[in-house]
Amino acid sequence: MNLSGFNTSSVKYMNYMFYRCNSLDGLDLSSFDTSNVETMQEMFADCSTLSKLNITNFDTSKVQNVANIISLCTSLTELDLSNFDTSRVTSVEDFLAYSYNIHHLVLGPKTYMFGSYPYDGFIPDVPAVGTKILGTSKLVKSSNWIVTNGYEKGKKYLSSELMGMRYRDQVTTYDWDAEPDNTIETKVVTRTINVNNPDYTVKTEKQSATIQRTVTNNPDGSKTYGEWSKAQWEEYNVPKILGYEPTQSLVPAQSVDGNTQDSTIDIYYDPMELTITVQYINNGKVVGSQRYVGYIGDTLTPRYLVPRGYVLDGIPPKTVTFDGGDNQIIKVNVKPR
């Protein structure tokens, strides 16, 4: 409805002007001149489909009656009364009665909601905790209104306390105390690496990666899930043990996302095949050699096969133990026969 051409500068009475206009979904009355209006009783009452109302430019300095002005506007969720001056109003009963979905309210320093009668319902109570807030994905967190901007920012009020306020020094915004639209879901995914040592001890390395996603609470109670973030398990170098070969020497780095599950990797050590070389030395030169194969810790009783034309020059070791070295050498001195 376009009312921008209305000349209302001389109008004194706007009672019931839009009463029960149940086909209206929005009204922009920012062009209305209400400087001479004295009564606005039930001006928008019972406009059950009205979801948007712009009356921010209303001059109400002469208004005396606003009883039920915006009562039963059940589709209205936000209302800006910052320019309302109700200091001369004598009848404010049920100002917002039964307009129970208004969760965002802007009041000015002269917007008083208390009246001369002890009626409840000027500002409807905040609904039960967990109630979905119309037009948003938020849920009611408590029975309070919270100051989100302006006088005493952060303070909480019950509806009855808000109605009884007799002072604010600036335009102030009040919203229902609500859960945030979005929450963050966090998941920790763990990779466990068990290193089984040859001495039967186990060293456990746990790698944890944290990923997150946004969860949106929809008005119908369902949830919409965002994409999981990504993280990474770092590369892990398996410890080296002399004389042993691990089943894998490196656990590679791995990307972690929403599909990654907890995992366990078991690593074992197998003994390496080692070599002992017996070198026969004469005058500093190797004149012959023998090779023996075994595993770390094994004890060998060598059968010395002295090269032809030489004899032992001294007593060589009777036993030799594989010490795990890659190139273990036993030097045996010999001399010409």
Image: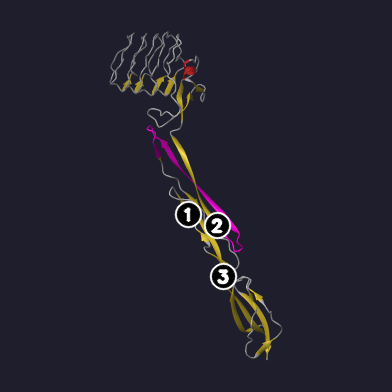
Viewer-closest of 16 and 160: 160
Q: Say which residue appears at 48% left-offset and 51% top-offset.
A: 262
Secondary element type, mark 1: strand
Say if residue 266 shows up in the picture: yes
Residue 272's disc number: 3
Task: Label the magenta part by its dominant secondary structure.
Answer: strand
Cα distance in 3D space between marks 2 and 3: 20 Å
239 magenta-colored: no
- The residues tagged by marks 1 and 2 sit, at their Cα atoms, a distance apart of 17 Å
Viewer-proximal residue, 190 or 19?
A: 190
Question: Is residue 132 or residue 9 the one in the foreground?
Answer: 132
Report the disc number at residue 194.
Answer: 2
Residue 195's x, y, as percent?
Answer: 56, 59
Toward which corner of the image does residue 124 lie, by quadrant? Answer: top left
Q: How is the image coloured?
A: secondary structure
Which label number is shown at residue 313? none
Q: Amino acid at mark 1?
A: Gln
**Label 3 neighbourhood size at 10 Å, few (<14), some (14-19), many (20+)?**
some
The label nearer to you, 1 versus 2, is 2
Is the C-beta separation of discs 1 and 2 under 8 Å? no
| x 55%, y 62%: residue | 268
Question: Marks 3 and 1, how far apart in space?
Answer: 29 Å
The residue that disc 1 covers is 254
Q: Of the two numbered discs 1 and 2 on the same chain, state the one appearing first in sequence.
A: 2
| Residue 50: x %, y % from top left | 33, 22
Quadrant into which the C terminus falls: bottom right
